[in-house]
Structures are given as structure tokens and as C-alpha cells.
Amino acid sequence: MAERETWATRLGFILAAVGSAVGLGNIWQFPFKTATTGGSAFVFVYLVAALVIGLPAILGEFVVGRRANINAIEAFDRLKHPAWTVVGALGLLTGLWILSYYSVVGGWVIRYIAGSATGAYFAAPADYFARVSMGWEAIAFHAAFMALTASIVAFGIEDGIEKATKLMVPSIVVILVGLAAYAFTLDGAAAAYSYYLSPDFDYIAANLESIVPFAVGQAFFSLSLGMGAMITYASYLGEVDSLPADGSLIVVLNTFVGLLAGLVVIPLLFVQFDGIPDTAAGGGPGALFVSVASALADLGAAGQALGVVFFGVVLIAALSSAISLLEVVTSYLVDNYGASRPTVAFGFAGGLFAVGSLSAWNTAWLGWFDDLAYSVLLPLSVLLGVVFVGWVYGPEAVDELKKGTGGGETFATAWLWSIRTFVLLGVFVTLYLGVSSIFPAPDIPLPAI
Ligand code: PFF
């Protein structure tokens, strides 16, 4: 068997992990879920979740991946706990489930690169979005996104993934900062900042049950947790790297990009609509596209060029995340059955294209796929992973986390206890609330006494 590749440099791993984390979840989804799920209250719960649950959980996936040095499915076998392969398998399924509709949104982004070049969406941004987000056109662009993803995965890890990600993070930050600064200068933006950034704790307390599943689910989605992606990437990692250092950097960067995207989208929506419009007018999944479109339209010809660059960079962010989803199943079949990379990558991409076409045909499907991913699949998958790392693998996990940190015993032990206690509890509560929101308890009247 050929020796397994490892990352050429530590930077290679960080870039790829950041590439997986930073994507449509941050740029497209975070701002629109914030807009529709309570504004600053959502942001507050999200931040707490990313730090208190997300960071320990991502370290758990790194530990499993690096220790096992193999794809997410076989990892548990390698660690001598074959029954827990179910975690890898559920992650793989969840990842494929998500990729099916993620690709539809990726298709919209490609559509908007073309639309920017011609200024097609300038005149009526919300109508344009309504037209291109569903139907045959959306299916065609979804196919294009899936084909691009499969082509990159087919080239193999170093060629495809490391290179694609290098430019993406700095460019996305520069462009988002520029757009956020522009939004800041507009009349009417002030109300947006208070909606977005000043949490009302009474409101949070009163609505916690409905905010938690979205905000914590968003943290998982955004950090690429519960899908085997981080396990798979960490499996290419050498022993000298410090997992806590890498993990913290990834969480911070990822959160930063999401917040920045919100600083663009939410003020732009407020300026244009005097608040958050309803979904049909661009307040839902169309928020990024509709809000940025109007800002670009104000810039005239320069807006066309900037639009191509902006959506171009968003496309790279989306691709580097989609790649990590497809990589999970590909590395499994390649490692295990000696399958050919291109065959697996294109084969699965074809299947996912078919399933995702439902979401491209009608965004109601997209919403349904997304709800199920957030409320059930992601928290369930993360929960099982956390139970495994905390209570089954325990001391060995501590041992692995310490490597490359030059000591780090206290940190690693504290980490294990966090996983065993409040991280586990937090994920469990999230799953419980998520499941009850999807399958509400039947409304049975109490018998009269
Ligand atoms: N984290 C990515 C984003 O925020 O867009 C999406 C994602 C990629 C989720 C890879 C899961 C994953 F395994």
C-alpha cells in the first residue's frame, strides 16, 4: 500500500481546515439566520456555543483523526473501538446530506458571478434572486458547482485543496471589510448595529429554547463538525503540531469571518428595507445575494467588477468547504477498497446532484434538508463523537491532545472534563430541543376533570 500523504506544512493543514470551516455557512447562512432568528440574541448564543462547545468538540475530532491516521470511518476501528464506527458513518451520511443542498447555494454563487459581469441583478435584486434560485437554471448551476467540487477532489489532497485555499481567506476578509466599511457610511445603518450587536438578555432568556437549536447547530455547521471532515483532515497531520493552538486559531478565524459577513449583510438589509424584510423580499436565504446586490448596484460599473471578485471569492470559500465534505467518503473508499479517486468523486457527485436537484427545484426542499441537518443530524453526530472521546477513549485522548504542545497536561485534562460534562450536556440539550422543534409533541388536550 502506498504511503499516506501528509500535509506539506503545518500551514497546509490550517489552511485546509480553515478552508473547510469558512464557507457558505459563514458568509451566506450566518447573516441570514441571525436576521431571522433574533439578531443579537442569536449572535450571542452562537458565540458562546462556538467557544464553549465548538472548540472542545473540534479538538476531539482532531484527536481521533490524528491518532488513527486514517479516514473518519475506519478511524474508530483503528482505535480499537469498532462499534463506534457508527459515528464515522453517521458523519459521512450527514456530510453527504448537507452537500446535496450546499451545492445548490454554490450554484447560486456561480450564477451571481455571471450576473455581476452583466449587471443583470442590479435593477431588481429581489426579483432576480427569486428567479434564479429555483427551477431549471438553479439545477444547471448546481450541476456546475458539483462538477467543480468533484474535479478538485479527484486531483488529490495536496494539489487540489492546499492551493485552492491559500488565497481565499485573505481575499474574503479584505472584501468583506471593504463592504462592511461601505455599509457603515450609509444612512440608516445605525439601527442595524443595535439589532445585530447589542444583546437583550431578557429576550435571550425568554426565547432560549427556540434560539439554541439554530445557534448551536450553526456553530457545528460552521466549524464543519459532526461530518468526519475534521477527523479526515487531522488524519493527515504530523505529531509535532499543537492541536489546541491550531484548533483555537481555526475557531477564531471562522467566527471572525461570520461576524464580518453579518456586518455587511445586516446593515445593507436595514438600509434598503428599513429593517429585516420577509423571506420573499430577501430576508431569508436570499439575504446575502439581495443585500450585496443593491450595494453593488449603487457603485455602477465598478460594482459589476467588484461583484465578480466578491462572488468569485465566495465561490472559492464554498468550494473549499464542499471539497472537505466529498473528501470524507472519497478517502474512505480509496483507503479501504483501493477505489480510484476520480471514480468515487464523480460517482458520488452524480448521486448528490440528483438528490440536490430537489432543493434546486424548490427552496422549500432546501429549507427542509437544512432543518433536518441542523436540528437532528448534526447534534446527534456531534453528541456521539463527544461521548466517544470523553467517556470511551478518555485517557488516550488526553495523551494525544498533549502531543506537540510541550507539556499541556493540565489543559488536556481540563479539556477532557469539559467534554465529559458541559460540552456533552450542551450538545444533548441542543439535540433534544432540535428534535422537539422538528417533531413537536402532539397537542393533546388534557382530559376534563
Ligand atoms: N463549515 C462549512 C461552512 O460553514 O460553509 C460547511 C461545511 C463544510 C460543513 C464541511 C461541514 C463540513 F464537513
Image (spheres, grey):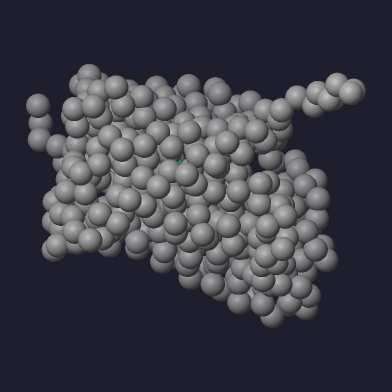
Q: Residue at x 60, y 48 (%)?
A: 212
Q: What percent of the width, then of the height, locates residue 201?
A: 67, 65
> Can residue 11 be seen by looking at this rendering?
no
Residue 15 in the image: above or below residue 435: below
Going 62% across and 68% down the picture, which residue do you hit?
A: 263
Identify the residue at horizontal 71%, vertical 72% (top origin): 194
* Residue at the limit of the structure toward the front, as seen here: 449
Would you say residue 407 is visible in this rendering?
Answer: yes
Q: In this orientation, which residue lies closer to the viewer: 357 or 4? A: 4
Find residue 236 and report its horizontal and vertical position in percent: 21, 44
Report whether 287 appears left or right of 251. right
> Which image quarter is the C terminus in?
top right
Q: Which quadrant would residue 304 be assigned to in this image?
A: bottom right
Q: The N terminus is located in which quarter?
A: top left
Residue 117, horizontal then vertical, whole percent: 61, 56
Asked whether, in this view, residue 341 is left or right of residue 346, the answer is left
Q: Nearer the viewer, residue 318 or 53?
A: 53
